Amino acid sequence: MPGWFKKAWYGLASLLSFSSFILIIVALVVPHWLSGKILCQTGVDLVNATDRELVKFIGDIYYGLFRGCKVRQCGLGGRQSQFTIFPHLVKELNAGLHVMILLLLFLALALALVSMGFAILNMIQVPYRAVNGPGGICLWNVLAGGVVALAIASFMAAVKFHDLTERLANFQERLFQFVVVEEQYEESFWICVASASAHAANLVVVAISQIPLPEIKTKMEEATVTAEDILY
């Protein structure tokens, strides 16, 4: 059985892995990966709007991996519309890249559970195989954190190099053309970053658990028998 010191740190490692699992689920469900400002370029060109009038033609957009929402501002007031990525909108995007992001996050969910299981195993008993010990915990956390980081990098690539926001803003638009003027990552994106950070923190936790504690030795005083003791 592992000592209380290692049990405490392995328990913390299992909690971090479970928290990463929950964070990924939240990031998948909440449609707030990115938000931005979209300019109705067609409306600006029609009325030859000045810089002060551009505010009337700037709308909002936010989206996640499955759905999103946009507010069109084309000079006639805001008009809100919602959209879903699957099954129609995915055809307008880089479908392979978007599906890869989802698959990576689902894989990260499984790896987070595996790393949690390994931490619980080491908390309960000392594994006979070294691969099931602290090295195994580190391995699964590296894999889980790396997969989440790869999903984050893929999403950033879709935004920067494949004009993801602009494609979403112009989906099913026949009369108006929208241009993205501002983009910023939102809470779901940063939740994924926190998930990857949890696995990185697990590596530190496992390293700390291997620090040997100083042993407290009690010296037993040997009883000496003297001649006076024998007399009594």
Image (spheres, grey):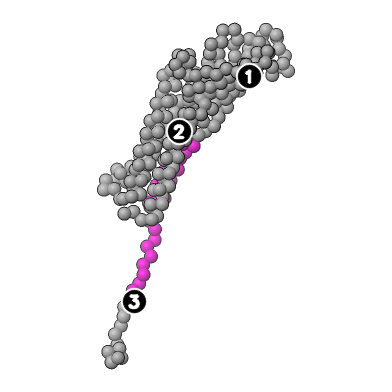
Q: Residue at x 36, y 70 (%)?
A: 218
Residue 140 seen in this snapshot? no
Q: Amino acid at mark 1?
A: Gly
The first of marks 2 and 1 along the sequence is 2
Q: Amino acid at mark 2?
A: Ile
Quadrant of the rendering where the N terminus is positioned: bottom left
Rendered view: 165 above or below 142:
above
| Pick the front one: 21 or 127 | 21
- What residue is shown with label 1? 59
The first of marks 1 and 3 along the sequence is 1
> What label does residue 24 carry, if any?
2
Could you give the CA–CA distance between mark 2 and mark 3, rounded to whole angstroms? Answer: 59 Å
Rendered location of residue 174, percent (x, y)? 56, 7
Is residue 179 within the magenta segment? no
Label 2's element? helix
For the residue carrying disc 1, how many other residues have a C-alpha within 10 Å: few (<14), some (14-19), or many (20+)?
many
Could you give the CA–CA distance between mark 2 and mark 1, rounded to whole angstroms? Answer: 29 Å
